Image (tube, helix red, strand yellow):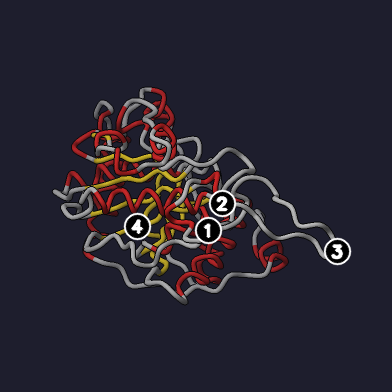
Amino acid sequence: MDTVNVPISAIRNRSSAPGSQTRPDGEGSVQVQLDPNVKIGTAKVFAVYGKGGIGKSTTSSNLSVAFSKIGKRVLQIGCDPKHDSTFTLTKSLVPTVIDVLESVEFHAEELRPEDFVFPGYNGVMCVEAGGPPAGTGCGGYVVGQTVKLLKEHHLLEDTDVVIFDVLGDVVCGGFAAPLQHADRALIVTANDFDSIFAMNRIIGAIQAKSKNYNVRLGGVIANRSDATDQIERFNERAGLKTMARFPSLDVIRKSRLKKSTLFEMDSSPEVDAVQQEYLRLAAALWQGTDPLVATPLKDREIFDLLGFD
């Protein structure tokens, strides 16, 4: 069965433990295979990863605006059931792809672009893929359906940059699906052990996908980090490179409370510096970055490597 073209409720787990009776293990509890023929096209595609709560949505949204400020047509796709990736761009929690598909009983031909694509600040197009209810489905299906809808409605033909804002470090189908479309994977981290530990696992996932797809590691974005000594120590060992750094500033927290990107906040030396860093990062990514070949560390190695003196 081609699971790409069926609703989540039709995807069932047919496996069972040895010696047990075969029975469904919940709705949609298997990883789906995405349609290899559904490709994004000519746009440059970036997938943003990192530990849950590290600031991926803030980073993605401000990077999207930075790309738009240098004249690029941008589409941001949120890939988290919270569906708040584009919150600061649209000023609201927009309906998700999975919600609108369900509303038409998964008859995708009944949808219009305005049902699932919403305009955001400075012309950034915004889509929230959403996700199935907890424990009942695979986020990979949702990502696949989202890209398929965008292709069917020709919404990717006039797009220069696509940014996938991916849920936290859960190495499953939903986590990995954007890597099948991305050119570069960017990892957001802070200067602490838990963030770097998650980054190490993400490296392994990206490496696995790079064997069969075009995605390569682009680099590290240090977020909420006044210092980067732990990040740089890990980068040197693993073979990574920090592309941008954003310090721990209260104005960043306030921007989300105001439903705003940092490009909409009142000018100040801090705000201006952060804006310039995002613009510099966007320009560097557009120009093109050399792929990084990183080697993930064993868990014990990270414990031995990192620590504050």
- Look at the numbered discs 1 and 2 and tell me whether their residues touch, using CB distance below 8 Å: yes
Circle nearer the N terminus (2, 3): 2
Label 3 sits on what residue type?
Gly
Of 207 and 20, the residue lying toward us = 20
For the question of whether residue 170 can be seen, the reply is yes
Please tell me whether mark 1 or mark 2 is closer to you in this view.
2
- CA separation in Å, label 3 and label 4: 45 Å
Circle nearer the N terminus (1, 4): 1
Label 1 sits on what residue type?
Val
- CA separation in Å, label 3 and label 1: 25 Å
Residue that mark 1 sits on: 32
Please tell me whether mark 3 or mark 1 is closer to you in this view.
3
Residue 269 drawn at (x, y percent):
28, 34
Please name the residue shown 46% across and 52% down the image.
188
Which SS class for mark 3? Answer: loop
The residue carrying pointer 4 sits among few (fewer than 14), some (14 to 19) or many (20 or more) residues within 10 Å by Cα, namely: many
Residue that mark 3 sits on: 19
Label 2 sits on what residue type?
Ile
- Look at the numbered discs 1 and 4 and tell me whether their residues touch, using CB distance below 8 Å: no
Please tell me whether mark 1 or mark 4 is closer to you in this view.
1
- Look at the numbered discs 3 and 1 and tell me whether their residues touch, using CB distance below 8 Å: no
Identify the disc placed on residue 11: 2
Which SS class for mark 1? Answer: loop
